[in-house]
Amino acid sequence: MKSTFFSAVPLLASIASAAPVEVRQATNIDTTVLQFALTLEHLENVFYKNALTNFSQHDFERAGYSKDYYNNLKYIAHDEEQHVLLLSGALQNAGVTPNAACAYSFPYTDVKSFITLSSVLEGVGTSAYLGGAPLITSKAYLTVAGSILVTEALHTSMQRLAVGEVPMANPYGTPLDPTSVYTLAASFILNCPAGNTALPFTPYPALTYTGNACTLEEPSGKISDLIKRNGWGKWGNGHQGRNQCRAIAGGSTASFTAASAPPAGSYLTFVNGLSVTSVKGTINGNTISAPIPTVDEGQTYVFVSSKDVEGALDSTSVLFGPSIIEVAPQPPTINYSVQ
């Protein structure tokens, strides 16, 4: 098992090639990046508006969430709408027709499963903006992307706390490349308008987490607060009171089911924060298992890769994924001698 962490000085010098993102392009593809960002914002915009249509303030209060939480949720919906308008305007000013919203299917069934899915979607959105930054040529566009990233991170923290997760489980955000993000987003897209410009990404074959996990991480959490998570695309109804649900711990073994049998010698590669770690997988049919790296904390993207990746994940090595798991963070340590 190999793991790479980056100290501050080398990181600033080599982030484009070392972190799990695609390197800066030699040609200007800014409008493609904007169109991709708009695709994600359309998805989030519709996601929140659907939920606010389906669930009333009373529904949220019955699920244990306050009037203030419901009001803050409307602020998130407002933010996503503004992001759609801003990106659409930027594309129009560049002489490009912005893509329209698609038709979507979101697998939530009640308030808690909606919030759980929201916490993951917001994390993916944050990772998308962070991973897409090296692809942007225009400094003006880069500033706008950074501004949206900050807001998406605030949304992520709010929703993580709402489901019992540590809001800032990792000291670093996790960059994710556009193809991986599009793979995740595509699972919610039913169809898109015929006039939309096709994005230059092909989704990776699917990888699904097969274990039982939940969102409960805070020390004060109670069993009644458990919200079960069975991996990307499989969301429960809360499943309150089932104490067999445990937050996944680093070092424990995780199993995943691939769309087809992984080749012999495949690895599970975990992308979390600024760490990319590959672990030799144990393969049984379509299932591949490996210990979760102890350095992983919080929302973690998992791939099946054809080789041991050290510090960078390129598209040529990805066989399946990503799947998403939540890894319980270690208790915080503070060295008061560090000034």
Image (spheres, grey):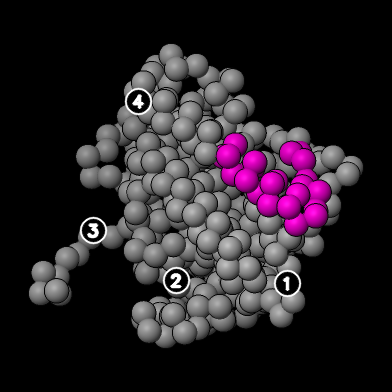
| Disc 3 to disc 2: CB gap under 8 Å | no
Q: Which residue is drawn at 70% across and 46% down?
A: 88
The residue beneath circle 1 is: 28
Q: Is mark 2 on a helix, strand or loop?
A: loop
Q: Which mark is residue 207?
A: none
How busy is the neighbourhood of tag 4: few (under 14 within 10 Å), some, or many (20 plus)? few
Q: What element carries label 1?
A: loop
- Asked if the magenta segment contains residue 90, the reply would be yes
Label 1 and label 3: CA atoms lie apart by 44 Å
| Residue 275, visible in the rendered structure | yes
Magenta region, residue range:
80-102
Label 4 and label 3: CA atoms lie apart by 29 Å
Q: Which mark is residue 68?
A: 4
Q: Which of 305 and 242 is in front in this view?
A: 305
**Place of residue 162 in the rendered image (x, y in percent of width and height, measured from the top left):** 37, 36
Does residue 59 appear to the left or right of 220 in the view shown? right
Label 2 and label 1: CA atoms lie apart by 26 Å
